[in-house]
Image (spheres, coloured by chain):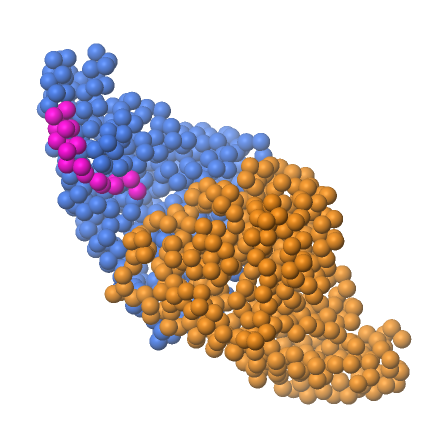
Chain colours: A blue, B orange
Amino acid sequence: MKAYKDMSKEELLSIKKALEEEYKEAEAKGLKLNMARGKPGESQLALAMPMLDVINSTSDMHTVLGNDTRNYGDLDGIGECRKLMADMMEVEKDNVIVCGNSSLNIMYDTVARSMSFGVNGSTPWCKLDKVKFLCPVPGYDRHFKITELFGIEMINIPLGTDGPDMNMVEQYVNNDEAVKGIWCVPKYSNPTGISYSDEVIKRFANLKPAAEDFRIYWDNAYCIHHLYEDTQDTILNILDECKKAGNPDMVYIFASTSKISFPGSGISAIATSPTNLDYIMKKMTVQTIGHDKINQLRHVRFFKDIDGLKAHMKQHGELLRPKFEAVLNTLEEELDGLEIGSWIKPRGGYFISFDSLPGCAKAIVSMCKDLGVVLTGAGATYPYGQDPLDSNIRIAPSFPTPEEMLAASKIFVLCVKLVSVKKLLEEL
Amino acid sequence: MKAYKDMSKEELLSIKKALEEEYKEAEAKGLKLNMARGKPGESQLALAMPMLDVINSTSDMHTVLGNDTRNYGDLDGIGECRKLMADMMEVEKDNVIVCGNSSLNIMYDTVARSMSFGVNGSTPWCKLDKVKFLCPVPGYDRHFKITELFGIEMINIPLGTDGPDMNMVEQYVNNDEAVKGIWCVPKYSNPTGISYSDEVIKRFANLKPAAEDFRIYWDNAYCIHHLYEDTQDTILNILDECKKAGNPDMVYIFASTSKISFPGSGISAIATSPTNLDYIMKKMTVQTIGHDKINQLRHVRFFKDIDGLKAHMKQHGELLRPKFEAVLNTLEEELDGLEIGSWIKPRGGYFISFDSLPGCAKAIVSMCKDLGVVLTGAGATYPYGQDPLDSNIRIAPSFPTPEEMLAASKIFVLCVKLVSVKKLLEEL
């Protein structure tokens, strides 16, 4: 196929006309599809329904150690659930606190705690003139919303195919004491789907932060969320690497079962060094008497162990794969060679990231919406909702059926083409 | 019985000798009982076990409005659960957000939010030189721990049999702009068991706070936690009263089902004005994607409505009553007329508050511990753990069996007597 940019005005006008015909037909169909958020689909939720049977009125409600999960106690989570989450996060049980239903809430609390009380004895961030976070972009909008809410200045760091630009990361972290954190989704990154290389992770572990209270916010949201059985990403263990590098306290790891069992009714955990855990527990004991231990027990009794979790996620992968492929195949069939967009084929996670021609993302998202296909707002993948190039669009294929995803993808590529043609014509 | 204070040295010495014999006998028994925390007992937990059957793998997981409780959404809670909690809290559904498993966590978050962001646009408290909270005493130690953690200065307000000393409350709230809140347990107060009178509540509602961001933190933890069917306390609706008085935004009400269904696996809620709710929701939407809606559905399907809740709590009352009576009867039989302690007979809630002779509480708690009976630490019912008179002791009768409570109560009165006799002898 000929690239749009190499076409004459006449060629572009002729394509535009054809696309506008397609647009009218699409409009007439009156689709109503939502690809905005990484919501598991109906078939994925169904996989976890038997979990609701493992705890019932006849169940022994005690932990292996004999604690009654129905009563107060076990602030850091029941032992067997800490073990399960530790195995999933590839750390030791003693590095883990199991919390409530939301890892996002743990991240929020971790930032909020640092604002109010500092980190392990450092000055509370609310007492500082300036606090900065590094934000690999494109990234997860809800991370950025947290730091924005607390008035933390966010600095864009380009995310490549092997991780963030580590020269920039080192430059900032090792020299600017105001830089207190970096948001990372190291595996099957939200939204690009890339995983950090060993070299990148080693460079992370070997940072020499100017700020004693600098921490890496390692949101390993998609740690076992593979799309394929044969080609899976693996990443280095950041906690081990930090320890080896003499930075044992430098990372907080977050994870949850929101996209394994049920969004909203899963369990979440934070993994970090014993020193960090001690500090967190001292504050957490004031915040709550404990998390939902019956739900922790339910998860352990259902999944049993890490093998159970992995077997369950294999089924998720099988359900998600056709949806991802519906998008990826459509992109390839319809856009390959046109040079009006690029994308990465992810091996796991929840998203496909699409980069349009500069200045086109908002228009594409808006046009899709007019045709009944809701995408994540353009710009959402950047701090403050501002994509400097207006080119990144996050596609979330999980919620619709494969058939719906195919229909939505066709609308998407139509909009990409039409917006791009118009843009190129304007620039002639 | 003759009051200890009216006895001669010889009489006291003779009593002391007899008590020391009793002490030795008690020591030999090697009891091991815990009356430290308001933990529901085994028999109470058993009442809620059928709740674990109402949601299973064959259940329709949708709300009345058709939302899937298994997926993201409904940040403010599912409608039918907001209705249930609203009925329990005697407010309208539109005044309620249903949250996670812990009302303490909502209170913590409410204070934390005010520290970081202020209240509905006011200056963040962390930017102020001084923030003060009024603390009716004796009160709930976990309230005081929250304000202590945030460096908020706590001011003791004596709690009478009809509520806090309102002259003092008005004096502080209406004149000191640094006073931003007051912790209240208005019904079956923790630990004294008293309920606020209509007059007290009307005076609360008619406060004229010097600070625009002053709020009443109304922890209605024991709203339907009656011990008796015939003699139940009722309190005025603070939200209505505040509205009538032109202070619609002045109160946050907190409640949970921790002591109705399961501690740690219940649901919690905050009720307040629409203006306050709007502000809270704007922050909460950054903090979490949502709370555990399956557990909300489980609660609604099990309790059905407020009548279901009340019927359930009637059974709780029946189980708790003999435990309370074991303590109260022992206190009456053993201490009446000795003038070495006073207590109030509560009609609901979770505690009995005992006031010893000044300077005796720590020694009594310590002696009980030596005899194997663990009580809440003396001083815990006061801010900073400092009871100026060293006289208040909180007794939590819920967890042991009635027989154990009787045995523990006998130890308790023995220690009260022995410590008091020693104290009086020292003062001769």
**A358 with respect to B90 (left or right):** left
Residue name at image x 31 percent, y 53 percent? B65
Instruction: Please state, as top left, top right, bottom left or bottom right, where the C terminus of chain A lies in the image.
Output: top left
**Quick check: B16 left or right of A312?**
right
Q: Nearer the viewer, residue A162 or A333?
A: A333
Res. B165 in view? yes
Q: Magenta part of the protein: which range? A: A19-37
Q: Residue at x 51, y 43 (%)?
A: B275
On screen, residue B171 above or below A127: below
> How far across and how far down the image is residue A257, in percent?
34, 54
Farthest-out residue, front: B244
Residue A98 position in % (x across, y down): 43, 57
Closest to the observer, B401 or B182: B182
In-image side of B23 versus B124 (left or right): right
The image quadrant of residue A310 is bottom left
Q: Is residue A23 above or below residue A122?
A: above
Residue A67 visible at all: no
Measured as percent of width and height from the top left, residue B286 is found at: 43, 42
